[in-house]
Image (cartoon, grey):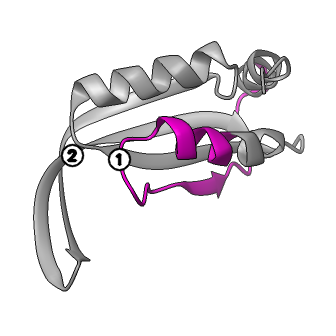
Amino acid sequence: MPTTDALVVLTTVATTDEALALVRALLDRRLIACGTLLPGARSLYRWKDQIADETEVVVLLKTRGARVDALTAAFGELHPYKVPELLALPVTAGADKYLGWIDKETSLALV
């Protein structure tokens, strides 16, 4: 099994338009190879001593570990939330061609 530094990064935003804007900006900077939008999520969380119950769009971002620092910095600039979710989950295996594509698409990151 080939080793990889591929990651799936999870985030959420309030609307599909916000998700599209974020993913396109990250693609333009080559910080991600792909962003998958999953609208219709419902998130319950504690915020400012209240329980929030919000509809959100889950966004799955495919990238590499080498891009996480730049991706984190870009979230500070581009993400609409004050405290954006950014959870990087390691990929332990995958199709060689797909992993190679992620690597290729994020190798020329514009930082």
Outermost residue, bottom side: 49
Q: Disc 1 marks which residue?
A: 12
Q: In which quarter of the image is residue 102?
A: top right
Mark number displayed over residue 62: none
> Do the numbered discs 2 and 1 sit on residues whose CB atoms are within 8 Å?
yes
**What x and y, as percent, mark residue 65?**
79, 46
Give x and y (percent) for residue 21: 39, 21
In the rendered image, residue 85 lying in the magenta stretch gets the answer yes
Residue 65 relative to residue 35: left or right = right
Which residue is found at the position 62% from the left and 54% from the top? 88
Instruction: Assign a secondary structure to mark 1.
Output: strand
Residue 99 in which image quadrant: top right
- In the picture, the quarter occupied by the N terminus is top right
Few, some or many C-alpha atoms within 10 Å of disc 1 (few <14, some 14-19, many ≥20)?
many
Q: What residue is disc 2 on?
A: 56
Whether residue 90 sits left or right of residue 8 in the image: it is right
Task: Name the residue type under label 2.
Answer: Glu
Amino acid tagged 1: Thr
C-alpha span from label 2 to label 1: 6 Å
Which residue is pictured at 52% across the width and 54% down the height?
Answer: 86
Q: Residues within 10 Å of mark 2 (few under 14, many from 20)?
A: some
Looking at the picture, how far across and down is residue 96, in whole percent?
79, 26
Q: State the SS at label 2.
A: strand
Q: What's the magenta region?
A: 71-97
Quarter placement of the C terminus: top right
**Vertical relation: 49 (above or below) 55:** below
Q: Nearer the viewer, residue 17 or 64?
A: 17
